[in-house]
Amino acid sequence: MKLRKWLVAVFVVAGAMAVPGTAVADHAAAPIHPGVMTFTGGGQCTSNFVFRDGGGTYLGQAAHCAGTGAATDTNGCDAGSQPLGTPVEIDGASRPGTLAYSSWLAMQAAGEADPNVCAYNDFALVRVDPADVPSIDPTVPGLGGPTSVGGPGARLGDTVFSYQNSSLRLGVPQLRPKQGVVIASEGGGWSRSVLTVTPGIPGDSGSGFLSSTGQAIGTLSTLQLLPLAGSNGVADLSKELDYARTHGFGGLALVPGTRPFRGNLLQAILGG
């Protein structure tokens, strides 16, 4: 969740661009990539994946990263948020990005009434300044991928991977890659409960989750005590993207990683 807001309740809101016709930068030299930190109105979160449409190139983050209320405000249909256009600091970028889309603001504008959507649709887009687009590598550090967007729905027992970057880990890179397992489905398929070792902590909100085959399947939204202490609520990315496409971002697409997905936690930790 956002670093400035700690858990106070049982369920709390938690190179070169790889485009056709361009060279792919060495990942170590690309300052902007999935997992870099974003800072919105004083709150710190972890970006998930890279996206683009006709209007620009974006980093995904959790909508609650721009929240203006309490840590317990998890209903995006009535929670306060910074407005679109708010500057967002991006680690590695030379200029601030801009909050271009918030599922919370989109739901409020649309009068969304589905309680599952209100509770679990927690996705935002930060438009990267055009000057910084050449400095993006869409590859997930250590793990590779993503290969594509995974389908909706949670499959219990599935192995998943994540890259989380809270500053509470004091910059230790070996603590960022995660492997876990899906332990429950929630909200009519809008969210999964995922157990990872170690679990996500404040500052990890928005982190991307990958399937065992490298598909982008979710974004870290909440830290939970139930059904199992230390588990995380992971919103379904395919549903979040579908919602964004029907609310102003019809051409939105994931940018795949430039290197194959490996799905090997030990290699990701060791950097091999």
Image (spheres, grey):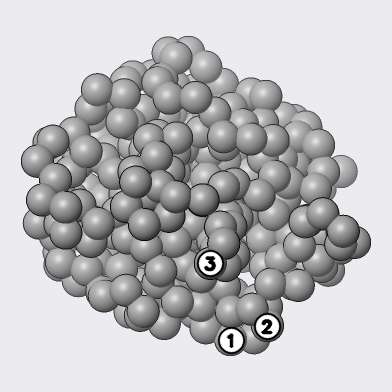
**Amino acid on which the number 1 mark rests in the picture:** Arg
Q: Quadrant of the N terminus?
A: bottom left
Q: Nearer the viewer, mark 2 or mark 3?
A: 3
Find disc 2 in the rendering and name its residue. Answer: 131
Q: Nearer the viewer, residue 147 or 212?
A: 147
**Amino acid on which the number 3 mark rests in the picture:** Gly
Quarter holding residue 83: bottom left
Question: Which residue corresponds to the image point at 36% horizontal and 57% vertical from the top-left?
Answer: 248
Task: Estimate the spatial distance between the alpha carbons at disc 1 and disc 3, rounded to whole Å.
Answer: 18 Å
Total labels drawn: 3
- Name above or below for residue 272 compared with residue 26: above
Task: Estimate the spatial distance between the alpha carbons at disc 2 and disc 3, rounded to whole Å.
Answer: 14 Å
Q: Nearer the viewer, mark 2 or mark 1?
A: 2
Question: Which residue corresponds to the image point at 59% horizontal and 46% vertical from the top-left?
Answer: 254
> Visible in this render: residue 82?
yes
> Visible in this render: residue 179?
no
Disc ID at residue 55:
3
Find disc 1 in the rendering and name its residue. Answer: 95
Disc 2 or 3, which lies upstream in sequence?
3
**Taking 156 as reference, is 114 left or right?**
left
- Name above or below for residue 106 compared with residue 81: above
- Name above or below for residue 106 compared with residue 56: above
Question: Which residue corresponds to the image point at 66% horizontal and 31% vertical from the top-left?
Answer: 214
Task: Estimate the spatial distance between the alpha carbons at disc 2 and disc 1, rounded to whole Å.
Answer: 8 Å
Specify few, some or many for label 2: CA neighbours under 10 Å numbering under 14, 14-19, or 20 or more.
few
Q: Nearer the viewer, residue 195 or 137?
A: 137
**Amino acid on which the number 2 mark rests in the picture:** Ala
Disc 2 or 1, which lies upstream in sequence?
1
Q: Nearer the viewer, mark 1 or mark 3?
A: 3
